[in-house]
Image: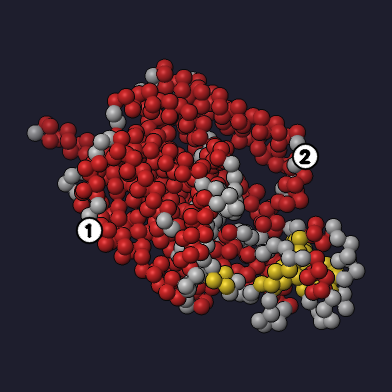
Amino acid sequence: MDNEKVKSISSGNFWEKESFFILALLFLCYLLFFFHLGARPLWDGDEGMHATTSKEMVLSGDWITPTFNGERFYDKPVLYNWFVSVSFLIFGFTEFAARFPSALLGTGCVMVVYLLGRGLFGPGVGFLSGVILATSGELIVLSRVVVHDIALAFFMTLSLYFFYRGYQDERLRKRYLLLFYASSGFAVLAKGPVGVLLPGLIIGLFLLIRKRLSFLKELLTLPGILLFVAIAAPWYVLISLRNRDYGSYFFIQQNLMNFLSSEARHRAPFYYYFPVLMGGFFPWSCFLPVVFFRALRERFAKGDDRILFLTLWFLVIFLFFSTASSKLPTYILPLFPAVSCLVGLLWFDLLKTPTPGLRRGFLFFFVLLFVILIPATFCLWLDPFTSLKVDYGLDLPRLKFYVLPFTGVFIVSFYLFLNKHLKASLLTLVGAIVSAILFSSLVILPIMDPYRSTRGLARKLDQVLAPGEKLVLVRVMRDSALFYTNRKALLLNTRKELIDFLGSPERVYCIIKRSLFESNETFGPLADVVDQEGHKVILSNKK
């Protein structure tokens, strides 16, 4: 009887703690991903382009062939555009609606990592892993903008989670493996072949190293493969039937050639992702040397499948994209869940059993943190960085004083660590990150908005132009302008095209970067500045 009471009490405490963990993570995600989500205009570039593509999908009623500026847009698969389009149907064509799917998917990533850490090491590790992922810089950014990569990260994380649960649990294996196939299908629909290729490489290497290739017989099932095909294939078939050039462009040029070709877009050296990882996962990236040293020395020697799986998850994605010719910072987001669990385990072990070895490892973290942070602060203080004012509207003297308090918070966290207040040290780190994000949302980003978005000028120009007339842009496609006006755009790329345009006998208008207009004396006699915002102006020809 006493044993039953103990079990009952333990179970109650356990679920109370679980409830707290889940609510705390959801509240953290609200602060970091949803707070002030629709207060800012959409920025030019990827955010404006993907929001405009989804808006055109809703307005045209064509949910198969995405278009941008009225032309077919093949660069990305359709799943994320569907999410944004559905959000537009629910909330209207607003900034909040455009960003809502990203915030939701970012929250999903955090909750799946909680489940992953909980399943591998227990609720405490799951909670810490979720906190670390939620407060990593790259996930915060991609959960607050309109970009496809967050969808791939969520569904790939979900697929690898379901695989490992199926690998662990013989009783529910078939159910988990079906969910693995479904998640993989959505990952392919979100970003293309990498959605199944990368999980396949991770799982294959894991089974090979563990000498469990026989598990493939249970993994490769006909119902699972049919479910994967039923989710991933129909849209690719339909768009290929409607657009005969889609298959060669997307699968050959956009995927294979961007990986292999020396002429691929966004080329970068092999080491490109080392600083990207350090910055995107900061400050938790400073723990990675300790994490991998500890895994190599202690965990691998014990044959720990869990550590091996997470390490392979990280290494396969990191090395795959490092090998690729085309590189962008957002590509490595799917490895963040794995390293979040590894860092979460490290913190849990320190809080539970702060051995001298662990404390030395954490001391190395703070040393590395200050090696990065203090020189960066001095660099900001000493270098004029005039481009910040010109391109982003940021006043450097004021920005210097914004940075100092956050540097001070890290010093406080270090002081608490030295005095063995470990939980307080962790809470201080998390609090610093949350405060920095909220401060940026309320103070820094609104200053940058006129420089990064064309919403104001586009709306003013929209009132002047005749219905159906195109927006004229110079040198750069101001993507957000299309979202806010429902107009198509004409892009002038050369000086001659602009001179001919301004020489029109009728009144014409165009949006141009101020520096480009002022640097060419030829434009002055031809045009006047009608309005301005940030570093952009509306020009009109002199009649």
Structural crowding at the residue carrying mark 2, measured as other residues with C-alpha within 10 Å and reported as few (<14), some (14–19) or many (≥20): few
Q: Amino acid at mark 1?
A: Leu
Q: Residue at x 39, y 19 (%)?
A: 355
Q: Residue at x 34, y 34 (%)?
A: 308
Look at mark 1 in the image and give the residue it sits on: 222
Disc 1 element:
helix
**Number of numbered discs:** 2
Residue 496 position in % (x across, y down): 81, 69
**Mark 1 vs mark 2: which is more N-terminal?**
1
User: Which residue in the rendered view is the most extreme toward the left?
Assistant: 1
Relative to 416, does residue 84 appear above or below in the rendering? below
Q: Give residue 116's quadrant in the image.
A: top left
494 left or right, relative to 371: right
Structural crowding at the residue carrying mark 1, measured as other residues with C-alpha within 10 Å and reported as few (<14), some (14–19) or many (≥20): few
Look at mark 2 in the image and give the residue it sits on: 384
Q: Amino acid at mark 2?
A: Pro
Q: Give residue 359's quadrant in the image.
A: top left
Q: Quadrant of the C terminus?
A: bottom right
303 left or right, relative to 484: left
Front residue of this view, candidates 18 and 500: 500
Residue 157 visible to an observer of this rendering = no
Mark on residue 421? Answer: none
CA gap, disc 1 and disc 2: 63 Å
Residue 120 position in % (x across, y down): 30, 38
